[in-house]
Image: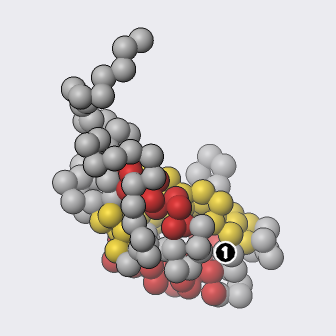
Amino acid sequence: MTNEQLIDHLSKAYPDTVAKQGNQYLEITVPKELLHTFMLNIKSDPNLAFDYLFCESGVDYPAFIQVVYHLESTKHKHYLVVKANTENRETPVLDTVADIWPTAEFHEDEIFDLLGINFNNHPHLRRLFLDDTWGFPLRKDFHDDIHVVER
């Protein structure tokens, strides 16, 4: 499928999403309530077959935190960037996709450790790098009076 065909296919199947051509990849923003179902379907649909999650990261915005998933269909050779926003910054939560793509388990551990997003149904969410005395250092409002590093 071309990117235009992908946009048409996904927009018809998921009218609550917003799809557009980004600078490099096709991008689609999915409501957090649809995230897990959407992701499961785009992997299992033989016309889409997004079988490879090659990057998952978090982005801090003033009102919410966003998780960005970079996906590839190794069968069809097309790419998709899926974005999902948390409801707020105080208690950011999204559903895990680790049951769909096992590599997401480690990406989500890192996102939890550095941005503080909790992932529902994650098999073992834990901090990877920092202990609990740290906050979430990739948040823009992070201030650290204890672990100050001098330059």
Residue, far top: 151
**Quick check: can you spot residue 4?**
no
In the rendering, at what x and y percent does residue 69 appear? 54, 61
Q: What residue is rendered at 73% in x and 72% in y?
A: 73
Query: Badge 1: how crowded within 10 Å, few (<14), some, or many (20+)?
Result: many
* Residue at image coords 25%, 43%: 133
- Along the line of sight, which residue is nearer the eye, 80 or 118? 118
Q: What residue did someone put label 1 on?
A: 50
In the image, is 10 to the left or to the right of 130?
A: right
Horizontal and vertical percent for residue 86?
Answer: 31, 61
Which residue sits at x=65%, y=60%? 54
Quick one: SS at disc 1? loop
Direction from residue 106 to residue 148 in the image, left or right: left
Expressed as whole percent of the image width and height from the top left, the position of residue 75 reads: 80, 76
The N terminus, quarter of image? bottom right
Q: Residue furthest left?
A: 90
Look at the image and tell me whether residue 90 can be seen: yes
> Which quadrant of the view contains residue 2?
bottom right
Q: Quadrant of the C terminus?
A: top left
For this view, does 105 lie left or right of residue 117? right
Q: Nearer the viewer, residue 111 or 27?
A: 111
Foreground pick, 147 / 112: 147
Q: Position of residue 50 (x, y in %)?
A: 66, 75
- Say which amino acid is labelled 1: Phe
